[in-house]
Image: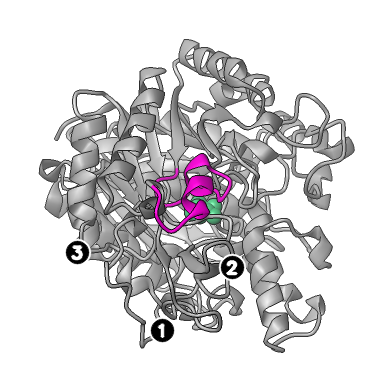
Amino acid sequence: MNKEWWKKAVVYQIYPRSFNDSNGDGIGDLPGIREKIDYLEYLGIDLVWLNPVYDSPNDDNGYDVRNYRKIMDEFGDMGDWEALLEDLHERGIKLVMDFIPNHTSDEHRWFRKSRKSRDNKYRDYYFWRSGNEKEPPNNWDSVFGGSAWKFDDLTREYYLHLFSRKQPDLNWDNPEVRKELYEIMNWWLDKGIDGFRLDVVNFISKNPKLPDDTTRGPYGSRGSKYYVDGPNIHSYLQEMNRKVFAGRDAVAIGETPLVSVDEGAKYVEPSRNELDMIFQFDHVTFDLDDGGFWSHPKDWNLTELKDIFSRWRKVAARTGGWNATYLSNHDQPRMVSRLGDDANFRRESAKLLATLLLTISGTPFIYQGEELGMTNYPFSDISELRDVQTINQFNEMKKKGEVEDFEEVKDKVRFWSRDNARTPIQWTSGENAGFTKGEPWINVNPNKESINVEAEKKDENSVLNYYRDLISLRKDHEALIYGKYEPLMDDDEEIFAFKRRGKDETVLTVLNFSDGKRELSLSKLIPKGWRGLLLSNYPDENLDEERTNINLKPYEARLYLLE
Ligand code: NOJ
């Protein structure tokens, strides 16, 4: 196996808007990140993935790019960005930029020109179709609610937008579009960045007929079967690889919602030269019922979750590819509120999930605030929400008469909205959690009093200190990076256990995902015994007499070094 640098990296995802505000305008910024590089070093981070910082009208917080070669004013300027890159590199931390190949902003120069007439060079950069005033060209739904088409009065045609109306989809079948995008990517790589996270990259190739969808796909929406892993996706990614990544030591990480195992295998198989790793979505959709984003979370089974992790690890093993491991990001609710128990066992379950993230195979991606055990936010009014998806979906439901007021969707928003993960990082217990001296663009979580960096640094049993221990353990034990993944107790509904078998040593992870105690026969699990306990999420464990049977406490996590 090739041991590329990104295989052993521990990644930290920064959502700049909510990370640290240096100038008091209430919005996090690049100089704010620079102020916190010590923190990244203290944690043991090797690589930062920065969410979009390009010039944008911010309909979707930067995922609507107006100019790919300019920095968003609120975040600073190119000088600030260059200084950030330099500071990170000086500390040995690499930087991956987010790149958005599927769509631009409607304020992007290309789209403004494209809109003007039915025949201009830029018309074919996007998808324009005629339909009629009452009915769009097909019945696809936008991921953010409503139709995926917007009628434009100027030329009396519709354009396609799989996301918001301000995010028109680019037409990748036009070679000019691909050429322009590759040029931009090369421009950034020439500036010295270490790779890209490619936004919804498996949506870029659409079925050229844009057919009506007679079925409902995941989240109850229509159209995805005609654009997820579409007809030319692999040839486009191979072309991108040749034109952009070939000959460089840069990593290509694909965000691939709804990806199937078969297509996923193709993206990561090294000999195909497409992507280095992908973010699959099975473990962040398995607890949704048919109502999609508006469903109450379904009761989920641990066996199902384990099966998902194993399935994707089998893909990596079969293809010689690699996994990207994540439990949360800026689009998902806080993981401790979702898979853990943020009311009764917040600390323990946050640590348990951290143990899973950092000891299972694949490159681990920590989302900002996860290392503090940050939780979902208790939203009580739509005015507190900022996320275009939550707001659009709510308005759509109101329009259809499905709901009347916020109260009816409150629990769902509290559970699902992307804004749960976008509240500011809690640096201190002080005003605005030390995030800004101004008015924060989104509320700070009231639990900043107890959950914050300052307090957690001082507390040796904090979630933060546990993350540091785990990260440094990962660096000391190669088995945790390259070791073979061997799942155990597949059928158990409470215990998630696996071995990582390395060249010289094997590490065992045992996680009690239940809120009750659990006895386990260790002698059955590891007949040869163990050399030592590497880590546990309960302090002051007296484990000496627990050589054969172990007694796990609620949400207990243990890591053993085996004989
Ligand atoms: C995925 C991004 O992670 C999300 O935040 C964004 O809204 C969509 N892609 C559209 O760009």
Mark pair 3, 2: CA separation: 36 Å
Viewer-proximal residue among 81 and 277: 81
Q: Which mark is residue 262?
A: 3
Mark 1 and mark 2 in contact (Cβ < 8 Å)? no
Q: Position of residue 230 (x, y in %)?
A: 26, 63
Q: Residue furthest left?
A: 271
Asked if 476 appears above or below 112 in the picture, the reply is: above
Question: Is the stretch drawn in magenta largely helix, strand or loop?
Answer: loop
Identity, as a three-letter code, of the amino acid under mark 1: Arg
Which quadrant does the N terminus fall into? top left
Q: Is residue 106 magenta?
A: yes
Q: Earlier in the sequence, mark 1 or mark 3?
A: 1
- Residue range (magenta): 100-120
Q: Between marks 1 and 3, how big is the CA–CA gap?
A: 21 Å
* Residue occupying image coordinates x 43% and y 48%: 199
Mark 1: secondary structure = loop
Residue 354 is situated, as x and y percent measured from the top left of the image, at 50, 47
Near-viewer residue (88 or 552): 88
Residue position marked by numbered label 2 in the rendering:
515
- Which residue: 34% across, 47% down? 254
